Amino acid sequence: MPALLWSGSGRTRGWLGYLGAVGLGAGALALASLWTSGAWATGIGAAVTTLSGLLTERLAPGDPPGAGAAELLRTPAGRIPRLRQVDRPELAGAHPAETPGAAPAYIERDAAPRLRAALAGGGFVLVVGESTAGKTRLAYEVTRARHPRHAFVRPISRAALPEAVRIAARRRRAVLWLDDLEDYLGAGGLTAAQLATLSRTLVVATMRVQEYRRYDAREESRLTGSDRDAWRAQRDLLQRATVLRLARHWSPEERRRAAAHQADPRIGAALRAGERFGIAEVLAAGPELRASWENAWAPGTNPRGAAVVAAAVDCRRAGLRRPVSREWLRALHAPYLAARGGGDLQPEPFAAAMDWACASAYATSGLLIGNYGQGYTAFDYLLNAPGPEPVPDHLWRGLLARVEPVDAYDMGLVAHQEGRLPRAVEALTRAHRGGVPGAELPLAIAVGDSGRPRRAAADLAGIVRRREDRLGPRHRDTLAARHQLAFFTGEAGDDRAAAARFAELAADTEAVLGPDHPDTLATRHQLAYFTGEAGDGRGAARQLERLLADRLRVQGPRHPQTLATRRSLIWYRATEPAEAGRQLAVLLADAEGLLGPDDPHTLAIRSSLAALAARSGRPAEATGAWAALAADRTRVLGAEHPHTVYARLEWARALIAEGRADEARALLARVLDAAGRVLEPGHRHLRTARELAAATTAATAPAPADSGIVVREAEPGPP
């Protein structure tokens, strides 16, 4: 995007006109009150007020600059532009399709009529789709055609959002434009309170589907303990939007409309690419740019440039929402280059690497977008590579050492969602110490999930007290903190106290939110679970039967939490082992089909099947099941995650039952080495490890794990 400059002379002339318009309105109202009365005065006053208001809006030289004012899109005279003045889609954030030159002709998308209808309704409209699906171009063209006279208020960064909201709220006609909405969420981002101030403003946003999915039901159920304040605040904000989904692949009718413009060589080439890629995707050269990045690793080409791009991509995957400076990329790219061969690749100088990465390729965007002053961001199409490896430790630590606390907060939330708990704790600690509002609750949850439930319960008790004093015991934020306190009270070993807390919480949650609210259902689930853990398995089964009926009615059979309730009911219901195994096998097939093989719910069901094999006296089957589960959890969650530790402990238990004490002893030594670094003293997994180590000495197997440990460790936590 070109720099948009302030013009001093233009601002001076603007202020004179603005003051004149204000004076006109005030003078006319005064004369009307002197010369006329009654309805005439009212009519003249209304007419002149309207006229002066139009002149004031037209001549206003720009709103008084506040924090972030320099990062708003403005005209060279320093004014907020009208939509009709935004004459290039790139100014709205669309990927450029040729430099220099005009953008390709706009081709009407099938979603356009639905978008026009949504815009007519006003409020908050969100277009969701994959990178380079054409989200921004669609939103720009339809919004500009419908509201050409509206002020176009576009913050360029999250820091500018409060100023953008203030300006948009003051305008009689305005569009608040939030391209890549994910960059405006989180600490310091858009809130429901800000949205409420924009009753006259049309909010138009776009969002990559990969980011939007972080807030759907499946992702909700992934969060062990979940970041209930930040994650749910963002989810609730998104639920206020009218959402339109845009497919990456173009329909036959869209391709027919595009054929009318195939004289443009760019559109013609996109049509000839066939149906493997969407036309917008080809126009933005997404596939070619990704291939260019992959090919650049070859010796003597641009391996340093490829390493720079890899570092920029992983910065975004780690949760960084703002551009990365040139100096950061200079430092962060080096390990990527070394891992591929270092000097043997004959890497180019760093300056040449940056030039290559930023150069417009195939007459479109570069692999990196930005400049020396603003910083650089990886082209978002590159984030969609299938099956990427986790962000490496060297990038994570190097980035966390450089970012501001608000960035660390974003990184911590992403790490927590992905099950990278030590990273989440480290980043959220940095955010909390840096004074980021709301960081204390997700930090406490991450601490508890990572293997320190007693520490988490103590921290949460303080949070609950402060929220009860400030907000009252039944405020939604207080209820969220009470839920987490009850959960980690049980995880710390006091199941009866946890059940008592959840019983009280269930009544309060239902009174405040209603019987069918997801929080009420989640509280009932945990109440049933800890009822069973406290020794009343039949009572837990009765509660779960009622809960399952309600989940099926409210959430449906495909909801992840419905699957979780089915699993718990199978476990606590007094069922013959063969029948329980059959039911769990059916549930596993359902979960794999709906959620995938690596989802926490799917892995939890496999945990129950392995435990059932052990209880049924099938140690060889149990050994194979626990070994496979431990390997998958290590791959998905890491070796130090408590769920991984648990699976490896039960694997050792099965080995002892098979008479393979030496193998179990070696496995336990590795487990204790990993668990001892992260679990708090007295953690139940450490107690289990000591019991199993003693059993290897006696070469006899201890009793199988009881239902408490098996169910507890696999529960994904409340949404």
Image (tube, grey):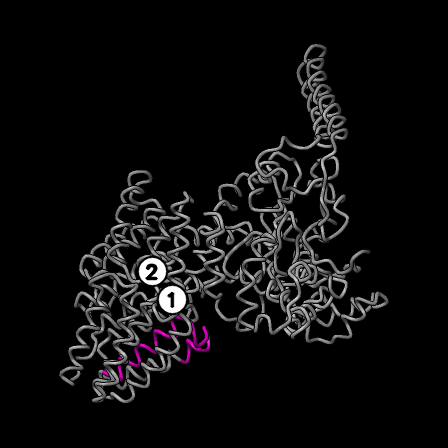
Magenta stretch: includes residue 318: no
Residue 701 lies, in percent from the top left, at 17, 83
Q: Which stretch appears magenta? A: 589-614
Magenta stretch: includes residue 590: yes
Q: Is residue 685 above or below residue 411?
A: below
Mark 1 is surrounded, within 10 Å at the Cα level, by few (under 14), some (14 to 19) or many (20 or more) other residues, namely: many
Q: CA distance from mark 2 to mark 1?
A: 8 Å
Residue 195 versus residue 146: which sits nearer the camera? 195
| Three-letter residue code for mark 2 | Ala
Q: Which residue is denoted by mark 2 in the rendering?
A: 522
| Three-letter residue code for mark 1 | Gln
The residue that appears at 52% across and 62% down in the rendered structure is 317
Residue 118 lies, in percent from the top left, at 63, 52
Furthest-right residue in view? 263
Q: Which mark is residue 471?
A: none
Q: Is residue 515 above or below residue 52?
A: below
Q: Which residue is denoted by mark 1 in the rendering?
A: 561
- Residue 537 visible within the image: yes
Residue 180 lies, in percent from the top left, at 60, 54
In the picture, measured across the screen, residue 348 lies left or right of residue 547, that is right
Q: Is residue 182 above or below residue 30?
A: below
Furthest-left residue in view? 698
Q: Are marks 2 and 1 in contact (CB under 8 Å)?
A: yes
Q: Quadrant of residue 97?
A: bottom right
